[in-house]
Image (cartoon, rainbow, N blue to C red):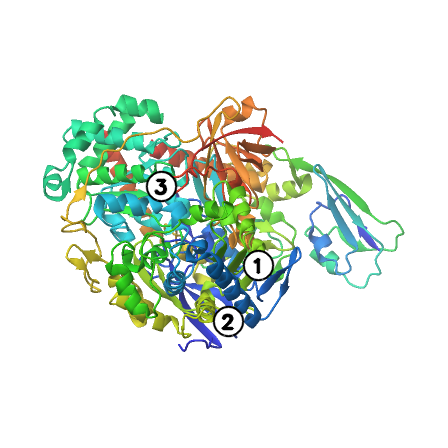
């Protein structure tokens, strides 16, 4: 399971960050990136199929667990190797590392996003994206 | 849930205290404290979502800066006093001015953040004392809507539910940054867009709202009317108007068509800076679509020609017949959580509750009878919010009662408001924090925040919703309802303390559109009020909440098309001040910042004042990104950090007005009809600090 | 006393964060990292166990160890963000085919903040292309 992003829908409202912070002791596991004042995108752990962070973690704190990448804080040594290993820069650390933990199954960013830019349902998101692309394609011919 | 008894663990339904979208959520209450938020997925507007402010809403409740005790001015500070003493002082101060100078020398500023019940009692207090000077901050935001749409259609509220935007085939958004300021509305715009609708956005800035647009019209500040007339010129020229609608439901087309002749796309392009081709594309898309919706906000209203701007916008949707059906409609997006309600409740000098005119002889009669007492109620308009400040500076207003407002930070040319309030003989301010306005008061009354009281809010789509009390207010703070009643009692008005529900009963008997409401119904799903041409009647739950389906509430049921002409901004640029300053909002903050500047999560997002500057203007001034700069106007200066961005065109700078001191720069030149100030355009320069 | 095998130490903050008595200090400047080990009474072996590369041991020496590392500069923003040995360790662990992004650049030379920027810039280019 992962949180997917419908890139066309992000309006840079920061709700995902504030909600995530609320549930994670003041630290957000999602980072809103605004590019050139022209578009925005929330970045968070992609629950990679071949997680580089898991490979780098010698302490067994990061492990693949049922289709996601789980983080066991009690094993974390704070070495920061996972931060360097993540190609997307979506692991952070204070004392220990932190990243998106999917909020125990009900991601709060998904629930709170005013435009539905964040979603758990891969099928639904791709459906929207595909029909949008198809429509744009059709328009291109007019 | 019993009133006044927070349960040990509960989910309390409430409505967000911030903007007019009126999103619902539950407050998690444990052992009498608000510990968290649960989303409300079946809410008709927000579908469970909350923006950054809604998510941070609980941060104001137990904030250490909350006013907890009544305060009396003492030297250069304040001392805490008892409620008895404070209320006596407040009543005395107002009473003295009343006695020495008369009711026309008293001013009342209501709160568009407070409930309907509270605003209703507030204006009742003012008028029962004989003062016609009662107003609310709508004067600074949608007063031009109230007057302009009132003139065009006989009514001035949003006509379709927000979710109906998903049914539009074309959405024209002008002077509104809804993606930042009404994020819940953006969902519905995106639904429409994903279904193939054309989104047109007109704004001087490339806001996140403009990201949604297929056609973006980057107009120069203050040129909205030229754009609208230019679009209408094309629609008339190319015969894209709705002939049937014009004949059956409007008056005045010939005069309008005539007045549009000079607004060729080329002329409109020259004035607005938007290519003529884009103006034509936008006009055609809007007119040709079977159902177009028109959304607007401060970019249209906050001008010295705001009423004209609104009428021009009305002309546009009227000539195309884009009103009174699903997917169409006019959406003046109201800012405050309850500014629609505050207006419905008559916290406006030119309207009694239910938009009855004071000059109509039946009005003082109806209310005189309902309110009892032997005093005659004012049968005329009084001073608007800014006029009260003028009057105070000129010695014609002696005392004011300000509820939940911070005019020192929200008024244009704010230094004059400070002068005005300092000149008063007596000022009582009621609020949840010691705002800059409260600091000028003789008596400060600590009020309960939204989650600490019961009552109703009316959102921008006319949805009346109940807020449930979740927690107790801190210290000795009390609900505004209680405070206003206590002051009234001490001023011989013979009022009894009542619950919000009881006050709502009284409102129902006097405001026809609220007639069918009940607390239970409002708690369950809210209620969109509606009126018809036959008079005012409340809709059934299943009835369509779309207004003006068959006619308009005007004497002949038709809407008026009125020629209006473009005028340049009130303050022109000059060699000393060659840039246009426009102000506006950020998603992370709210209005004068009394709540959001005290919320840590929101301060993390935007901690301080910045000014948006175009790269070429920055280069010319040797200003780099992040440099400290001074924004200079004829009225004052502001220090800010430079943010170099292409969001603003060359020649335009943008300041968010949430931070103190920004409104010291804005212009207090007013629309002659609505008395709303030109907050959106001023001349300035920016220099390195 | 803690002895540090300088040929093994990669300059990570694990032992610095782990010492319950705060005897290990890590100081970052914009370009370098200095890790210093103060005299310790050998009450525990937390740091020894926690080290990813087994660089620490208890020893009867008098010298308080101090190591310094250059912080490799991010090839995007130029700020020092990681020690070379830490990056080398990650490089050696990750499969080679994972180490280059779509444009053939090694993202390991870029700091996490710039990685986010790159990711979002890439996505935004696509968004903007679709808009026009």
Corner quadrant of residue B311: top left
Q: Is residue B681 above or below residue B472?
A: above
Nearer the camera: disc 2 or disc 3: 3
Which quarter of the rendered picture does the C terminus of chain A lie within? top left
Circle 3 residue: B301
Q: Is residue B471 above or below residue B298?
A: below
Give x and y (percent) for residue B381. 34, 51
- Name the residue rendered at 50%, 40% in the picture: B413
Please state the chain letter of the residue tagged with numbered disc 1 in the rendered image. B
Please state the chain letter of the residue tagged with numbered disc 3 in the rendered image. B
Q: Is residue C71 left or right of residue A17?
A: right
Alpha-carbon neighbours of circle 1 within 10 Å: few (<14), some, or many (≥20)? Answer: many
- Mark 1 vs mark 3: which is more N-terminal? 3
Please state the chain letter of the residue tagged with numbered disc 2 in the rendered image. B
**Judging from the image, what secondary structure is the residue with disc 2 in?**
loop
Corner quadrant of residue B545: bottom left
Label 1 to label 2: alpha-carbon separation: 26 Å
Label placed on residue B472: 2
Nearer the camera: disc 1 or disc 3: 1
- Mark 1 and mark 3 in contact? Answer it, CB < 8 Å: no
Q: Is residue B627 above or below residue B75?
A: above
Alpha-carbon neighbours of circle 2 within 10 Å: few (<14), some, or many (≥20)? Answer: many
Q: Is residue B537 left or right of residue B157?
A: left
- Name the residue rendered at 74%, 45% in the picture: C27
Circle 1 residue: B442
- Please tell me which residue lies in front, B328 or B156: B156
Visible in this render: residue B652?
yes
Give x and y (percent) for residue B564. 26, 33
């Amino acid at each position: 399971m992962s949180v997917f992003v419908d890139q066309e829908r992000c309006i840079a409202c920061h709700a995902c960050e504030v909600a995530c912070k609320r549930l994670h002791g003041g630290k957000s596991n999602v980072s809103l990136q605004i590019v050139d004042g022209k578009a925005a995108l929330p970045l968070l752990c992609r629950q990679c199929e071949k997680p580089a962070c898991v490979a780098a973690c010698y302490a067994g704190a990061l492990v693949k667990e049922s289709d996601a990448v789980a983080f066991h804080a009690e094993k974390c040594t704070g070495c920061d190797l996972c931060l360097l290993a993540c190609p997307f820069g979506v692991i952070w650390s204070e004392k220990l590392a932190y990243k998106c933990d999917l909020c125990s199954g009900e991601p709060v960013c998904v629930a709170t996003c005013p435009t539905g830019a964040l979603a758990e349902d891969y099928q639904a998101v791709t459906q929207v994206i595909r029909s949008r692309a198809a429509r744009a394609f059709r328009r291109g011919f007019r | 849930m019993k009133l006044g008894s927070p349960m040990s663990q509960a989910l309390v339904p409430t409505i967000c205290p911030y903007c007019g979208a009126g999103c619902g959520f539950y407050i998690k209450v444990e052992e009498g404290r608000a510990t968290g938020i649960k989303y409300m997925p079946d809410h008709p507007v927000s579908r469970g979502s909350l923006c950054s402010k809604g998510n941070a809403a609980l941060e104001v409740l137990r904030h250490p800066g909350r006013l907890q005790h009544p305060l009396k001015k003492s030297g250069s500070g304040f001392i805490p006093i008892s409620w008895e003493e404070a209320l006596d002082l407040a009543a005395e101060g107002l009473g003295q001015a009343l006695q020495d100078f008369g009711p026309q020398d008293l001013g009342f500023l209501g709160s568009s953040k407070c409930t309907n019940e509270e605003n209703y009692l507030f204006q009742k207090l003012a008028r029962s004392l004989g003062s016609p000077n009662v107003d609310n901050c709508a004067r600074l935001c949608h007063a031009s809507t109230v007057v302009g749409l009132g003139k065009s259609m006989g009514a001035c509220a949003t006509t379709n539910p927000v979710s109906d935007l998903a049914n539009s085939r074309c959405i024209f958004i002008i002077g509104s940054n809804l993606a930042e300021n009404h994020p819940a509305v953006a969902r519905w715009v995106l639904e429409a867009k994903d279904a193939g609708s054309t989104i047109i956005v007109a704004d001087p800035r490339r806001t996140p709202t403009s990201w949604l647009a297929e056609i973006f019209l980057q107009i120069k500040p203050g040129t909205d009317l030229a754009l609208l007339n230019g679009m209408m010129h094309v629609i008339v020229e190319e015969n894209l108007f709705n002939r049937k609608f014009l004949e059956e439901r409007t008056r005045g087309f010939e005069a309008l068509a005539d007045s549009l002749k000079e607004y060729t796309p080329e002329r409109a392009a020259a004035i607005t800076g938007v290519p003529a081709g884009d103006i034509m594309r936008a006009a055609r898309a809007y007119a040709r679509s079977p159902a177009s919706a028109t959304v607007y906000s401060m970019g249209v209203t906050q001008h010295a020609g705001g009423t004209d701007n609104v009428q021009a916008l009305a002309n546009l949707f009227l000539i195309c017949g884009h009103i009174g059906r699903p997917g169409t409609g006019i959406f003046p997006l109201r800012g405050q959580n309850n500014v629609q309600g505050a207006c419905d409740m008559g916290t406006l000098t030119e309207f009694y509750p239910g938009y009855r005119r004071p000059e109509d002889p039946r009005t003082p009669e109806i209310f005189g009878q309902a309110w009892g007492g032997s005093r005659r109620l004012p049968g005329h308009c009084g001073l608007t919010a800014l006029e009260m400040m003028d009057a105070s500076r000129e010695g014609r207003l002696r005392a004011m009662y300000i509820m939940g407002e911070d005019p020192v930070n929200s008024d244009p040319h704010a230094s004059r408001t400070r002068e005005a309030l300092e000149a008063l003989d007596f000022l009582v301010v009621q609020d949840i924090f010691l705002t800059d306005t409260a600091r000028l008061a003789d008596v400060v009354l600590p009020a309960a925040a939204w989650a600490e009281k019961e009552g109703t809010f009316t959102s921008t789509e006319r949805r009346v919703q109940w807020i449930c009390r979740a927690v107790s207010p801190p210290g000795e703070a009390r609900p505004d309802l209680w405070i206003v009643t206590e002051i009234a009692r001490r001023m011989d008005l013979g009022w009894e303390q009542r619950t919000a529900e009881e006050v709502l009963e009284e409102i129902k008997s006097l405001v026809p559109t609220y007639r069918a409401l009940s607390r239970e119904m409002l708690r369950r799903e809210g209620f969109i009020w509606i009126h018809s041409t036959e008079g005012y009647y409340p809709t059934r739950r299943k009835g369509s909440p779309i207004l003006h389906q068959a006619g308009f509430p005007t004497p002949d049921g038709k809407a008026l098309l009125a020629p209006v002409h473009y005028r340049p901004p009130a303050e022109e640029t000059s060699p000393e001040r060659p840039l246009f300053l426009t102000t506006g909002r950020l998603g992370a903050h709210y209005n004068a910042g009394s709540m959001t500047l005290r919320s840590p999560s929101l301060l993390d997002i935007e901690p301080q004042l910045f000014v948006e500057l175009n790269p070429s203007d920055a280069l010319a001034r040797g200003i780099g990104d992040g440099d400290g700069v001074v924004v200079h106007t004829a009225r004052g200066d502001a220090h800010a950090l430079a943010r170099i961005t292409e969001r603003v065109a060359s020649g335009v700078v943008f300041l968010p007005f949430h931070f103190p001191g920004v409104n010291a720069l804005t212009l207090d030149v007013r629309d002659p009809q609505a008395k709303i100030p030109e907050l959106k355009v001023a001349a300035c320069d920016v220099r390195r600090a | 006393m803690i002895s540090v095998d300088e040929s093994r130490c990669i300059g990570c903050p694990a032992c610095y964060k782990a010492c319950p008595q705060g005897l290990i200090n890590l100081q970052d400047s914009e370009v370098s990292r200095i890790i210093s080990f103060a005299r310790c009474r050998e009450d525990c072996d937390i740091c020894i166990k926690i080290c990813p590369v087994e660089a620490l041991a208890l020893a009867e020496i008098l010298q308080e160890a101090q190591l310094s590392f250059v912080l490799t500069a991010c090839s995007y923003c130029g700020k020092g963000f990681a020690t070379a040995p830490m990056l080398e360790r990650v490089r050696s662990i990750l499969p080679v085919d994972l180490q280059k992004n779509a444009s053939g650049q090694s993202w390991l030379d870029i700091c996490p903040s710039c990685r986010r920027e790159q990711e979002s810039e890439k996505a935004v280019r696509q968004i903007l292309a679709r808009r026009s």
